[in-house]
Amino acid sequence: MGRLDELFGTSRAPGEGGSDLERLEGIEEAASSGEFPVAIDLLDHLEKEENVFLGVQMVLRSLMDYFEELTPEEVSSYLRELIPIINGISTWRYRALLLGKVAVLYYRIEDDFNGDIALKSSINLAYAAGEDVLIEILEELIKFGILEKAAHAFSLVKDRKKVDYLLGKVAEYFYLRGDEEKALKALDYIEDPFHRAVTFYRLALIEAERDRERALGFIELAIENAKRIENRYAKIELLMKLSDVRAKLTGEGISLGQILKESLGELPKDHSNANEEDQDREYLQPSNPHQEN
């Protein structure tokens, strides 16, 4: 096991005892129990940088979970201890993601000054590390409704499909909070038919158990947009998903032949465009895993 221990940073540290794996288990146990001083102390003894990243992530995640039980002073104190550890990480991607979460926690305790500093550092690092990192940071800000602060980062996203993906998240955020006007306004800005269809699909899942007719209306809008998707393979996959939801809402069966005949026409004989668009399948997953049952 020596080589595996070396690979995963699980070899015993001289004078400290234990391995990175054991320390990570201790961090997870302490953080999930709300024992943040213990968890933070263990972070200082991790050897491998990727394990430091994982350990800090665990602590930040638990701070989010315990947020309502902690005072702003306690949250601020823990963040001050974490920031030097985060800044000691050399990988830009890791620092960007962690500082993005730190910024969210500062904003949640209404410390905009430190939140702005953390977010600016996070965005600068993300811009250098890659647009996908920026997307993850923005998703976290949108999740907690910190939209004003997200505006600058939003403007840095150049890939139009990723902008549309984020706008879908914004629309869902507002809809879940009962602000339908803002939700539909955000949705109107989505250009890509795939992301428009997926957003309508997700709104349908929200309404599925409380207003069947409204859910069906959203599904029909999703299908209308899905028919405009250029990539035939993505179109088939999404239309089948939407037809399945419509069948559950109406009690009717799915006609695959009808979907192919009315919406797709004859499929190409080659596979030249099978991968022309990377339509991430996680976009089709409901925010609440119980919504689709």
Image (cartoon, grey):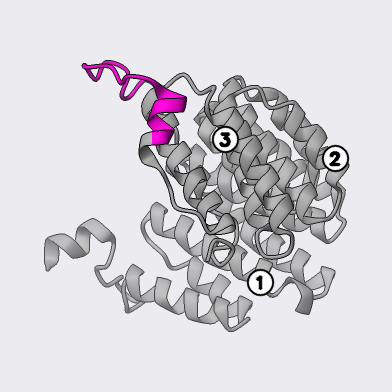
Asked if residue 71 lies left or right of residue 97, the reply is right
Of 20 and 188, nearer the camera is: 188
Q: In the rendered view, would you say 165 is above or below 139?
A: above
Q: Is 233 placed above or below 205 here?
A: above
Report, in whole angstroms, how far the alpha carbon at label 2 lies from the one at label 1: 28 Å
Q: Nearer the viewer, mark 2 or mark 3?
A: 3
Q: Main secondary structure of the magenta part?
A: loop
The numbered mark at residue 223 is: 3
> Picture quarter containing residue 181?
top right
Earlier in the chain: of badge 2 and badge 1, it is 1
Q: Position of residue 77 (x, y in %)?
A: 75, 67
* Horizontal and vertical percent position of residue 288: 59, 62
Q: Are marks 3 and 1 in contact (CB under 8 Å)?
A: no
Q: Is residue 262 left or right of residue 98?
A: left
**Looking at the picture, how far across and down is residue 29, in whole percent?**
49, 81
If you read the primary sequence from the N terminus, does the residue marked by circle 2 or circle 3 appear first?
2
**Mark 3 residue crowding within 10 angstroms, few (<14) / some (14–19) / many (20+):** many
| Nearest-to-viewer mark from 2 and 1 | 2
Q: Is residue 179 visible?
A: yes
Dot 1 amino acid type: Asp
Whether the magenta-drawn stretch holds residue 129 is answered as no
Residue occupied by mark 1 = 65
Q: Looking at the picture, which amino acid does disc 3 mark?
A: Ile
Residue occupying the point 76% across, 42% down: 117
Residue type at numbered disc 2: Lys
Q: Residue at x 39, y 24 (%)?
A: 232
- Which tag is nearer the camera, tag 3 or tag 1? 3
Residue hosting label 2: 182
- Quadrant location of the N terminus in the rendered image: bottom left
